[in-house]
Amino acid sequence: MPFKSENRREFLLKLGALIGGLFVFKSVKANLKVEKDQNLIMLEDLKRALSKPVEERKWVMVIDVMKCIGCKACVVACIAENNLPPGVTFRWVFEVEDGDYPEVRRFFMPTNCMQCDNAPCIEAVNKIAPGALYKRPDGIVAVNYDKFKDKKVFQAAKEACPFQALYWDEGQFYTEGTPKIMPYEKRKVKEFGKEIKKGDKVPFGRKCHFCLHRVESGLLPACVSTCTGGAMHFGDLNDPESLVSKLAKERKGYKLEDQIKPRVLYLYGKADAEETCSICHG
C-alpha cells in the first residue's frame, strides 16, 4: 500500500535529521580530544614516587578552589576511611561569602593539616614532650601516640596551629545510645604505621596524615579519590613530571601562612588571591 503524503514527508524529515546527526557526531568525534582521567595520572605519579627512597619524596596537596563545589564528599570519605568519632574530622570545607547584594560571591575552602615544613605545632610540643610530633623525611607531620595522649601536649599543639587541624579523640561512637554499637565503629585503622582501635589509646590527639596507609599502598588519599569536582590533587613535588608539579608551576597559587611553609597549595584560577584565599588569610 502506498505511503500517505504526510507519512512520506515525516519519514524523509526523520531520515534527514538522522543523517545530519551522524555527520555532526563524526565531526565532533574527529575533533574531540579525550583527556586522561586526572586520578589515573596521579596514580601513575604515585607509583613513580614510591619507587624512590622515602627521603626523596615530597608529598604535597594542590587544591583548585574554583573547582570545589562544596559537596563535602571529601569530609565523609575522610571520616569513613579513618573511622573517626563524632566531633572529629581531619578535614573540613569552609564556606566563605564575600561582597554585598547583588555582587555576592561564595567560595568553598577545603582544608586539613598543612604538613608545614616549619610546623608551629612541632615547636610547641617539643618544649613539653619532645618527639610527640615530628617531621617524616617525606614531609608529613607524624604523631607519637604514646606522647600525644597527654591533654597538655595536645592543647599546646592545637593552640599553636593556625589551621585548627588537630583533634582530641574521646573515643565516642555514632551508634552510642542505640541497642548496639555497630561493629564497623570498632574496626581498626592504620595511622603512621600503627593499628588503632577505639579504646586502645583513648583519649588521645589525632590529625590528618595524608592517608599515609593508602599512599604507601599505591592509593590516593580518600579525599582526593572521592572529590566530585576534581578539585583535589596529590603527589610528589620533587617529580617534575607529576601533575602536582605541573599545576604548581603553570597555575596561580596561594599558600596560607606562607612563612611556616605549608605543603598544601591553593589554586584560584581566574580570580585574584585577594578575592578568594586572602578574604580570611590576607
Image (cartoon, helix red, strand yellow):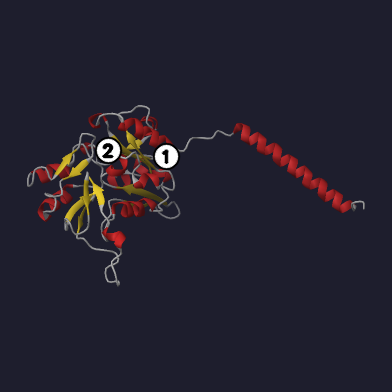
Q: Is residue 282 visible?
A: no
Q: CA distance from mark 2 to mark 1?
A: 20 Å
What is the number of callouts on the image?
Answer: 2
- Above or below: residue 102 compared with residue 142: below
Residue 279 sits above or below residue 36 on the image: below
Rendered view: 53 above or below 180? above
Closer-to-camera residue (26/64): 26
Residue pictured at 20% horizontal, 57% vertical:
169
Please name the amino acid that badge 1 sits on. Answer: Asn
32 left or right of 83 in image: right
Q: Nearer the viewer, residue 46 or 158?
A: 46
Q: What residue occupies the far top of the structure in this picture?
A: 240
Q: Which numbered disc covers residue 39?
A: 1
Determine the secondary structure under disc 1.
helix
> Is 18 left or right of 41, judged from the image as shown?
right
Q: Is residue 81 above or below residue 51?
A: below
Q: Is residue 9 left or right of residue 178?
A: right
Q: Residues within 10 Å of mark 2 (few under 14, many from 20)?
A: many
* Sequence-earlier tag: 2 or 1: 1
Q: Which labelled disc corresponds to residue 73? A: none
* Image position, residue 95 (x, y; %): 35, 53
